[in-house]
Amino acid sequence: MKSKAETVETNVVKLTIELDADVFNESLRKAYLKNKGRYSIPGFRKGKAPMSIIERYYGEGVFYEDAFNLACPEAYEKALEENNVIPVDRPELDIEQIGRDQNLIFTATVTVKPEVKLGQYKGFQIEKTPVNITDEDVQKELERIQDMNARLITIEDRPVQQQDTLNIDFEGFVDGEPFEGGSSKGYTLVVGSGTFIPGFEEQLVGANKGQQVDVNVTFPEDYHSDTLKGKEALFKVTINEIKYKELPKLDDEFAQDVSEFDTLDEYKADLKSKMEKEAQETADRNYENEIIQKAVENAEIEIPDVMVEHQLDNILRRLEMSLRYQGMDLQGYLDIMRTDETTLRNEYRDKALQDVKTQLVLEKITAEEKVEATEEEIEEEIAETAEKYKQDKEDFKKHLKNDDIEYIKDTVITRKTIKLMTA
């Protein structure tokens, strides 16, 4: 096999690949064996006709496409390796010569990983943000935990107030007609949460359990549904249930219920310690990110659009996975945010571009500094990961695939690279 590479434009390489005739002939034979059962030839049982007869009956090139598909992948991979080409997308293939007893010649035009020209990437004079967790910060966190542990108490003897939790049925009408998505039964609504259209929740204040309330609102001009933008609507709302939130008292008993501590003071001290640790970790990450950002700004690099698009795919895939854990799909999220996927991709485009730049710059620094991960460091990372998931290290290792090990190795290398930059 012979191959050569030429740069046809920035970050685009054209590989010309030539396979010997005997190699292509072997691919033709394999294509025949794979497909011969598909052809019916008069005088032969199905699948028993010789290759030459099938070619004569259906045309000389009947097996060319399958033979090419059999020969191409391995030849393409070898050409990438021979020419030190790192693709970031699928190649565009073009056959220049194909035929029995002929060398197979084809081209593969592919977008490649761009060259990175580093500028300054270490030795920056940047001050770390000091960490200061106050008693007020601890009290706010304590009140957040208090709210999480509140009980909902059913109300029978008073009307709806702000912050009450309601169970309601509602049906919406525009121009006297019900509209799609405008009705629900048994819906849970916290009054004052801003979940519904502006003005909706406020009109429920003062209503009693079992009462039906006519709520008049106007859909915002930027509402996600074109048919409802700026429209006046009437919602007929029935109050099924009223509940209010009863907060537990902040005392030693509360501390015993939500923690392993006997007194509230001990619990608050532990909260402060954890908050300081978390704040320090955040400050360290921000410091590292600032240095990485400066290194990226100092580097010269042209990012192929396809790499940005791939990263956008990754971002939306992670978003969709996160939404599934919350019981929602991407389309539901888009509806709530009053947007569409194209707009969402455009909103994330700058982040995707920055993600790709950052990854390429870090890879280049890693190569320049010859950063590697030792077996001991990889084992330590595995142990920490297993501990995080509360698993025995050896049991955890048994379930790791090669890709998992590579990911752990890359994690160690990236961390060491960043540490070198921030030293």
Image: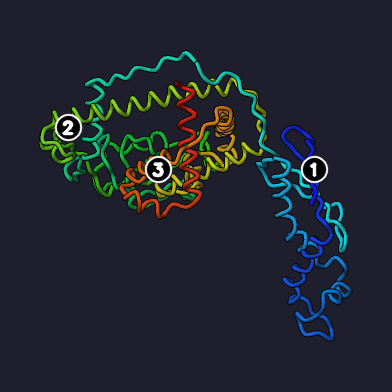
Q: Which residue is mark 1?
A: 4
Quarter location, residue 81: top right
- The residue located at (34%, 25%) in the rendering is 280
Q: Secondary structure at mark 1?
A: strand
Which is closer to the viewer, label 2 or label 1?
A: 1
Marked residue nearer the N-terminal end (2 or 3): 2
The amino acid on which the numbered mark 1 sits, given as a three-letter code, is Lys
Residue 109 on image: x %, y %:
76, 44
Q: Which residue is mark 3?
A: 379
Residue 393 on image: x %, y %:
34, 48
Q: Is residue 220 above or below residue 323?
A: above
Q: Secondary structure at mark 2?
A: helix
The amino acid on which the numbered mark 2 sits, given as a three-letter code, is Tyr
Q: Which residue is mark 2?
A: 267
- The residue located at (29%, 19%) in the rendering is 132
Q: CA separation, marks 1 and 3? A: 42 Å
Marked residue nearer the N-terminal end (1 or 3): 1
- The residue located at (17%, 32%) in the rendering is 267
The amino acid on which the numbered mark 3 sits, given as a three-letter code, is Glu
Image side of residue 394 versus residue 1, left or right: left
Q: Is residue 158 above or below residue 128?
A: below
Q: Is residue 72 above or below residue 407?
A: below
Which is closer to the viewer, label 1 or label 3?
A: 3
- The residue located at (43%, 24%) in the rendering is 286
Q: Residues within 10 Å of mark 3 (few under 14, many from 20)?
A: some
